[in-house]
Amino acid sequence: MSAQNPIEKKSAVVGSEGATTRPAAGSRYRGMVRPVRTIAILGAVGALVGAIALPAFASANGTAGAAPVTTQRIAADNAQSIVVASEATQATSERSTFTATTPGEIEAKKAEAAAAARAAEVAAAAAARAAQPASSPSYAGYAMVAPGSGLIRYPLLPGSYTSGEGPGSGRGHQGWDMLAPQGTPIYASMAGTVTGSAESIGGYGVCIIIQSDINGTGVESRYGHMVYGSRLVQQGEQVAAGQLIGMVGNTGNSYGSHLHFEVHIGGGIVDPESWLAANAG
Ligand SMILES: [Zn+2]
């Protein structure tokens, strides 16, 4: 188009705005309108092609050593577009399981699906809770090892208990009752092998029994009335002196939260309170 034709130039600029800008009367302009619009359309198509092709060209040039943009390469890009389109079609067909047609029905279907998802979540949470004892307590913040360096330790930390009834009370009591709030941490008094660990051992309730060797002497310690689900060691495991093994509770033949602690040496019981006072360090 040459600058010598002012009509063509003017129409090319305003052509996309349509009939209102078209010259109204002059018959000598009438023949010019169609070719001018065609040129404008071609120009628009050219702009579209440029908009599509230029980014591809730019991205190809942005990579060092990239292959030049060829017809084959553009065809490959188009093929990728076709793959994306087929995936989109697949997703659409999956969504077509919704047969609702009105907005209200669609909302109802969505609510139904959301309710089903929530029910599944609740069921999963319930299953997770069932997998472990409902009363399984948390040990967050507990010291895993009691302070001290001796072969024999107090099973409860100093200051975490008050002294209760000892053995020899006439009713067959064989241990020392260490009165402490539910959840107070219990530590192995001595290193050894766990010979008993269960949620119910007779009147001991939740109980752990540990067999130890103290300078060639066999010593058995028992920890009774612990919290359900609080046992951290199982039968056959080795424990270290001062290792966290459970929590003070009120299970078995017990009427108040306390640790029933027994010490057996050579087949007989000893008074744990005085024995610990003489040997613990
Ligand atoms: Zn007791």
Image (cartoon, rainbow, N blue to C red):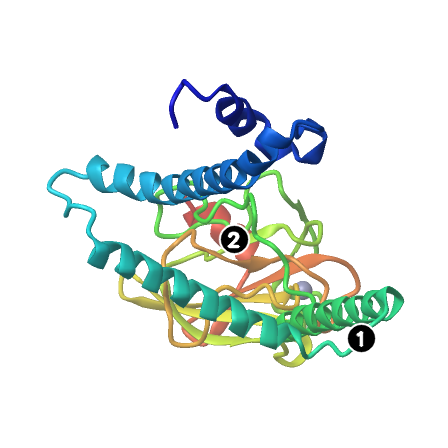
| In-image side of 262 versus 96 (left or right) | left
Depicted 25 relative to depicted 259: above or below: above
Q: Which mark is residue 34?
A: none
| In-image side of 157 versus 144 (left or right) | right
Label 1 within 8 A of ligand 1 by Cβ = no
Front-lying residue, 210 or 87: 87
* Residue linked to disc 1: 100
Real-space CA distance between mark 2 and mark 1, rounded to the nearest whole angstrom: 67 Å
Mark 2 surroundings within 10 Å by alpha-carbon count, few (fewer than 14), some (14 through 19), many (20 or more):
many
Residue at 78% x, 67% y is 110
Ligand 1, seen in the image, is in the quarter at bottom right
Residue at 20% x, 47% y is 69
Residue 219: x, y in percent? 40, 67
Circle 2 — which element? Answer: loop
Depicted 217 relative to depicted 73: above or below: below
Residue 214: x, y in percent? 32, 61
Residue 90: x, y in percent? 52, 74
Give amino acid for label 2: Pro
* Residue linked to disc 2: 155
Depicted 65 relative to depicted 118: above or below: above
Mark 1 surroundings within 10 Å by alpha-carbon count, few (fewer than 14), some (14 through 19), many (20 or more):
few
